[in-house]
Image (cartoon, rainbow, N blue to C red):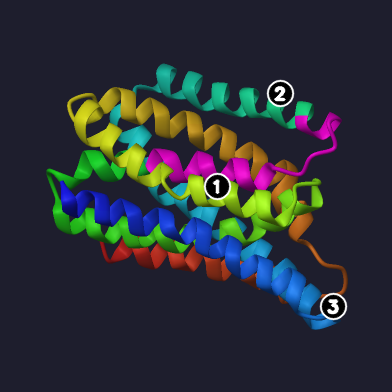
Amino acid sequence: MQQLILHAGFAGATVFLGGMLANFFNHHLPDSPVKYAITHTSMSFGAGIILSALALVLIPKGMETLNLFPLTISFLSGALLFMVIDQYLAAQGGQTATLLAMLMDFVPESIALGAVFAIEPEMATLLAIFIGLQNLPESFNAFRDLVQSGFSIRKTLVIFFFLSFFGIAGALIGHFFLTDYPDLTAHLMTFASGGILYLLIQDIIPESKLKQNYLTSLGAVLGFLIGMIGEKIQ
């Protein structure tokens, strides 16, 4: 149990670390074209990592377990729910798409980490590393979005500190309650996939584009490559 908590704790700690790095980068370095390009490249890199989690982890796990009809219902339900949430938040003037996508990715994978740990500890170790690597750029970008939405730096860092413990909570839930319920875990992953894909296309990818700079899009390719490498070495 101690090993599971350590694995999940590492995976979640990078949420807070990404917020700390974003605070330093955004508020303690002078504005410049290079800084602007790095910010947008990090957004596209995070989008690539989220997309890799979607394509290589969440959807395949759901498709392995669920039949076509329940798979379709779960996927569309996630997309429709987060379309409604996104519309509501947009009406309020908030920019939280990256944070929502990060949580939709982080929580199901943490639950999967807990469910897998008792069966394949080595795979669980690699999954924890992969989740941690994903959370770093995602939280970096989410910090910027929350601050631009009107949250203070201190409040945003406090939020990220508590979010970093979601990994431990998710892993314990997966380990104790969902190990014997693969269908429920698959529904959760497929539901999350629909929501993530909607947020990526609607908000995150368009925001990451930078005019007259074609290298920023390469960040998404590199982010997806990180996911490919993580999946390959499992």
Side (left or right) of 27 relative to 24:
right
Q: Nearer the viewer, mark 1 or mark 3?
A: 3
First reached walking from the N terminus: tag 2 or tag 3: 3
The CA span between labels 1 and 3 is 26 Å
Helix, strand or loop for disc 3: loop
First reached walking from the N terminus: tag 2 or tag 1: 2
Quarter of the rendering containing residue 144: bottom right
Magenta span: chief secondary structure: helix
Residue indicated by mark 1: 102
The disc placed on residue 31 is 3
The CA span between labels 2 and 3 is 35 Å
Queried whether the magenta region covers residue 93, the answer comes back as yes
Image location of residue 128, percent across then percent down: 32, 56
- The amino acid beneath tag 1 is Met
Query: Magenta segment, which residues?
Result: 89-109
Residue drawn at point x = 80 percent, y = 46 percent: 149
Helix, strand or loop for disc 2: helix
Vertical comparison of 153 with 30: above or below? above
Vertical comparison of 11 with 214: above or below? above
- The amino acid beneath tag 3 is Asp
Which class describes the residues within 10 Å of circle 1: few (<14), some (14-19), or many (20+)? Answer: many
Which class describes the residues within 10 Å of circle 2: few (<14), some (14-19), or many (20+)? Answer: few
- The quadrant of the picture occupied by the C terminus is bottom left
In this rendered view, identify the residue nearer to me: 69 or 134: 134
